[in-house]
Amino acid sequence: MAEDLAVKIKKKWVPVYVVLLAATIVLLAGLYYLYTLTGSSDYSTAGLLDAAVVAYIAWSLYKLVGLKFKPREVVTLVECGKCGYREERPYEPGDFFFKEKGKCPKCGGPLYVAGIYVKEEGEEASFKPLPLSSSLATFITAASGMKRGE
Ligand SMILES: [Zn+2]
């Protein structure tokens, strides 16, 4: 499930970054052409700025392609009925509340399942799209939806 989310985000954002990258490269070529034609420093300054944008978008695209989500880990919390010793263990199918899970490593008392929960990795929030690409993403999503007749 977590992997699907990474695929979803990539499907949505990779075309946006490719379009943005292509557009800024075309702009850069155009600015360079105008600069060689006129020799005006306005074009070279704009070209340098655009080159920085190209590099930034390329870097974002590179990070996006490498984006991976760690699967969420389900853990079982076991607690000693005698001394209160607690330990997190990977969830095993068949674990349920108050199930006995072996002996306490501290006092030898019985260990019981005190909780079963999902450990949040918090990876979903690590990808933040560029502000200007948000509207483009909406447009591309809408356009590809129209093509498929959705
Ligand atoms: Zn104990």
Image (spheres, rainbow, N blue to C red):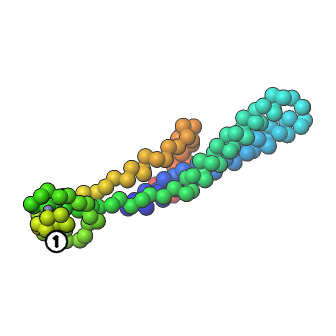
Residue carrying label 1: 102
Question: Looking at the image, which is closer to me, 128 or 149?
Answer: 128
Which residue is rendered at x = 20% and y = 58% of the image?
A: 86
State whether residue 20 appears in this view: no
Question: Looking at the image, which is closer to me, 30 or 96?
Answer: 96
Q: Is residue 30 above or below residue 58?
A: above
Q: Residues within 10 Å of mark 1 (few under 14, many from 20)?
A: few
Q: Is residue 40 above or below residue 126?
A: above
Q: Is residue 118 above or below residue 125?
A: below
Coordinates of residue 7 in the picture (x, y in percent): 48, 59
What kind of element bears circle 1?
strand
Coordinates of residue 18 in the picture (x, y in percent): 63, 51
In the image: residue 114, left or right of residue 41:
left
Q: Say whether mark 1 is within 8 Å of ligand 1.
A: no
State whether residue 26 appears in this view: yes
Question: Looking at the image, which is closer to me, 66 or 131?
Answer: 66
Which residue is rendered at x = 61% and y = 53% of the image?
A: 62
Coordinates of residue 109 in the picture (x, y in percent): 11, 66
